């Protein structure tokens, strides 16, 4: 890998090839890649990060594509991370969506990166944040993180955006209806996409009612909105972006008090996640090398101990001596 | 909490109230509950654990309900864990499914437990395994773990069963089609449920083709099967259970060589997960108390450092001194 500072400078200058290369290197755990990321970090934190999440099939990619289009028409540069934790085994279907989005690939104002696996960071969340840091440092005005809103990781990525958009469609089945609930709690803006379908207004009413039930009485806090869109035909997308703008203004008033508070929480969470993975990796490597891991597994299998006691014992010997 | 050995003995004798109480106590982190779990562990490992997983809406609960019914008709006792990581916020829809299953609640040969949150274990996987250990120690012949097959945790739970059943339906959308791929890799038995719908046979052919592509050339390894079911009308369920029986036989032949190998992997994974959560909790508590966590967050926010350097520094001071 080239000299770290050189790569940092190139990416800060917006060099697309250097950025793409770094993202690959980070995934592959190439020595030095993480040093570049460290060098970029002081230059991150300027972009507005928008999370777009929802169940499979609600049209997130199409909506993201429309958002890119409109943001570009406004002259803003855009970085996109599309997170897809499904196996690369038959990525054909997903490729279809991505290809639609890739029509922006020739636009130098747009950078799109798909993430399917955890890569070398050990966690999809950490990998995504690394890519967002790179895009941010490149100087993109707006970052879009698109994730499937199921599973803890994916919800977390969306929840730690500055503005979180949760997408649903009219008339989903019972189970998916329930999935939506977990997402409702992290939504700043809610979208009923495919709103030409029957029941769109009913879904909107339901969402408003659910929001009303959980709404705090604090008049100072942000009140989530509900938008009807037909992303495929670009209907309602301008209104949604106006909502994003209003939420952004909300975050920035009073010298950005709300934004600072939110980001403090996000940084704390991000740091703890990194720490969790890092400590764990280091520990497993050590226990693997000295045979203690296999010994514990053997003892549990033979029922000479149980996983809980073995774990407590291991923690005692690994952590407590350091105090 | 009563004397640990007393509670252990009661649960080993199959006392339903003591078991239910313990599960609640484990969730709530009641002191002593984990000691009971340790006491039960040596008596676990006898049940056959079946994982049932798939996307939302494919009919997992209905299928599980039918499996319970047939297993009971065969005179086998059944323990069920239904894992639902969605928010309890609007559990109405899910409650419907669960209620259907609850018709077995008055049958002393069946024990059903729903898990929605991570509880005190810090992980849904760990909580689920704890409940499965209790059910196993109670002497249930067969354990069923039903999880939504999206998100890493949920797939992991299903993947560490003795027999993993992956459920799908004909004609799902592109995105869900892709989700299926990640699950395909962990499936011992595949089910196309709602097989009266159009395209069932086509879906079955697709799955067979996908299986064929990834199939190893090892004639000794298990070859996944595909079943067509209509769980609602109890069609095809007997054949599926016959498949489970055959897979179980496969695991048990040659003095259970395949079963032992699989379980070794599962125990290793389970132990590592416990260790990860345990070490992390201990560490965060300590860093929270001495103010080092807040100091790190401040430094990152002020961009005096970056999360990666701060994390490495923290790991150095916390772990390396113990060597």
Image (cartoon, coloured by chain):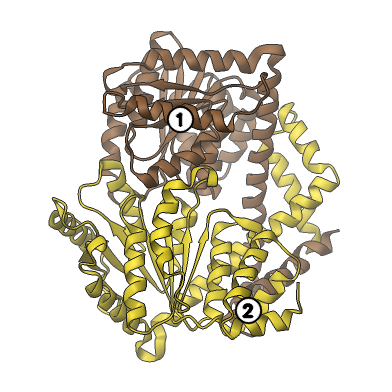
Chain colours: A brown, B yellow
What is the tally of numbered marks visible in this picture? 2
Q: Chain of mark 1?
A: A
Query: Considering only vertical position in the picture, is A318 above or below A229?
Result: below
- Asked if residue A18 shows in the view, the reply is no
Q: Position of residue A155 (x, y in %)?
A: 51, 40
Q: Position of residue A47 (x, y in %)?
A: 56, 20
Q: Position of residue A124 (x, y in %)?
A: 50, 44
Instruction: Residue at 65% x, 51% y: name it.
Output: A276
Judge from the rendering whether residue B6 lies leftward or rightward of residue B66; answer left or right.
Answer: right
Q: Residues within 10 Å of mark 1 (few under 14, many from 20)?
A: many
Instruction: Residue at 59% x, 57% y: name it.
Output: B123
Q: Residues within 10 Å of mark 2 (few under 14, many from 20)?
A: few
**Closer to the camera: disc 1 or disc 2?**
1
Judge from the rendering whether residue B159 lies leftward or rightward of residue A272; answer left or right.
Answer: left
Q: Give the residue pinned by disc 1.
A: A207
Q: Chain of mark 2?
A: A
As drawn, the residue found furthest toward the front would be: B106
Give the quadrant of residue B213.
Answer: bottom left
Q: Secondary structure at mark 2?
A: helix
Label of residue A295 in the image: 2
User: In the image shown, does A313 or B117 lie closer to the viewer?
Assistant: B117
Instruction: Residue at 44% x, 34% y: name it.
Output: A53
Query: Considering only vertical position in the picture, is A257 above or below B166?
Result: above
Query: Considering only vertical position in the picture, is B179 above or below B40?
Result: above
First of labels 1, 2 by sequence position: 1
As drawn, the residue found furthest toward the top would be: A74
Give the quadrant of residue B268.
Answer: bottom right
User: In the image shown, does A105 or B97 lie closer to the viewer?
Assistant: B97
């Amino acid at each position: 890998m080239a000299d770290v500072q050189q790569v940092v400078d190139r990416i800060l200058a917006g060099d697309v090839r250097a950025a793409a290369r770094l993202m690959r290197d980070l995934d592959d755990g190439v020595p030095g890649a993480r040093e570049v990321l460290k060098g970029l970090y002081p230059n991150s934190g300027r972009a507005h990060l928008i999370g777009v999440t929802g169940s499979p099939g609600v049209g997130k990619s199409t909506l993201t594509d429309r958002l890119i289009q409109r943001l570009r028409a406004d002259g803003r540069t855009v970085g996109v991370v599309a997170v897809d934790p499904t196996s690369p085994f038959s990525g054909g279907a997903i490729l279809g969506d991505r290809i639609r989005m890739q029509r922006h690939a020739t636009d130098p104002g747009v950078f799109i990166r798909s993430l399917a696996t955890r890569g070398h960071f050990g966690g999809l969340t950490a990998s995504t944040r690394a890519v967002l840091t790179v895009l941010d440092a490149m100087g993109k005005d707006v970052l879009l993180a698109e994730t499937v809103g199921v599973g803890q990781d994916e919800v977390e990525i969306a929840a730690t955006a500055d503005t979180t958009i949760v997408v649903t469609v009219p008339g989903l089945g019972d189970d998916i209806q329930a999935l939506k609930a977990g997402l409702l709690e992290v939504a700043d803006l809610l979208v009923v996409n495919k709103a030409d379908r029957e029941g769109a207004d009913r879904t909107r009413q339901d969402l408003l009612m659910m929001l009303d039930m959980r709404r705090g009485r604090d008049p100072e806090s942000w009140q989530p909105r509900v938008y009807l869109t037909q992303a495929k035909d670009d209907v309602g997308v301008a209104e949604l972006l106006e909502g994003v703008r209003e939420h952004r203004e909300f975050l920035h008033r009073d010298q950005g008090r709300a934004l600072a508070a939110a980001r403090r929480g996000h940084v704390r969470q991000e740091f703890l996640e990194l720490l969790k993975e890092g400590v764990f990796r280091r520990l497993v490597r050590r226990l693997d090398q000295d045979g203690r891991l296999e010994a514990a597994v053997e003892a549990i299998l033979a029922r000479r101990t149980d996983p809980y006691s073995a774990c407590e014992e291991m923690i005692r010997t690994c952590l407590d001596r350091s105090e």
